[in-house]
Amino acid sequence: MLVAGSIGALSEVWGDLQRAAGATERLVELMQAQPQIKDLPQRASAPSVADSQRGDAIRFDQVCFSYPSRPGTLALDHLTFSVSRGARVALVGPSGAGKTTVFALLLRFYDFAHGDIALFSTALRDWPITSLREQMAIVPQEPVIFAASAMENIRYGRLKASDAEVIAAAKSAHAHDFISALPDGYASFLGERGVRLSGGQRQRISIARAILKNPPILLLDEATSSLDAESEQEVQRALDEILPGRTSLTIAHRLSTVQRADQILVLDQGRLVEQGSHESLLAQNGLYARLAKLQFL
């Protein structure tokens, strides 16, 4: 009976080992995968400080792009716009207009086929990819919260930041109060994907992470679209405190979140169809005015 029980246990262990071997093989494949987009050989370092202080923060010039899965459909169709330093610019439009594609190209998740994109007057392809992404921080629609403490989740924005810097970033993001109210404060375990937090709290952790990184450009991808009214107000209050004077590009479906933008760019089917302030776009009685009437009524 002892031998038979031991053999039965060994068979179970062998099954676990087989599953672990398969998972490990897949992990090794992922770790050894080479990215399709690589740095140019002649560009080994980031542009100089003098170069990075000239021109607009972001410039798109006649950019055309199609996703590899849909080569016959233009996600961006000769898109041209610029974002000045310190400007607060919003991207609005119906679903599928190309707003998220703009972010994907800025971060070089894909390469565009036609046109030119420049960051601080330097062509996007001339930036080393690591240095390029250091110039930006993104607050996604669905923030990624790790199974770690609140302190470590915020510190992910800048790994060498001190505890005092993490707490200062949390205060700027209006996250300090609810973090302090957790059982262990900043040492509290947030759970896998932040299950112990509400949607608005997870979003403010993500904003604090971006503040701690303190990049020249902040990208906001529908940061309040999935929140209730009270959480949206808290997140919007945090954004209103950190965005003035900082270059930001915001994707928004809720037009109430972009009324204070310096400039609103209205996209439709990959094209820029309108641009201006909230008041001027309402006066044009075009696509933006129609979207505003649908929402505000």
Image (cartoon, grey):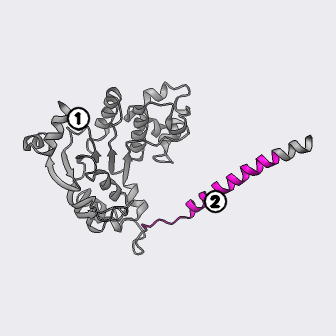
- Which of these two is toward me, 127 or 33? 33
Residue 246 seen anywhere in this rendered image of the structure: no
- Whether 84 is drawn above or below 260: the answer is below
**Label 1 crowd bin: few (<14), some (14–19), many (20+), radius 10 Å:** few
Residue type indicated by callout 2: Glu
Q: Which residue is mark 1?
A: 256
Residue type indicated by callout 1: Ser
- Which of these two is toward me, 245 or 21? 21
Report x, y in % for residue 276: 14, 47
- Which of these two is toward me, 31 or 126? 31
Marks 1, 2: nearer the viewer:
2
Provide the major secondary structure of the magenta segment.
Answer: helix
Q: Residue at x 26, y 61 (%)?
A: 74
Q: Which residues are magenta?
A: 9-37
Q: In 3D space, how far apart are the residues under numbered discs 1 and 2 (Cα atoms)?
A: 48 Å
Q: Which residue is mark 2?
A: 25
Quarter in which the N terminus is drawn: top right
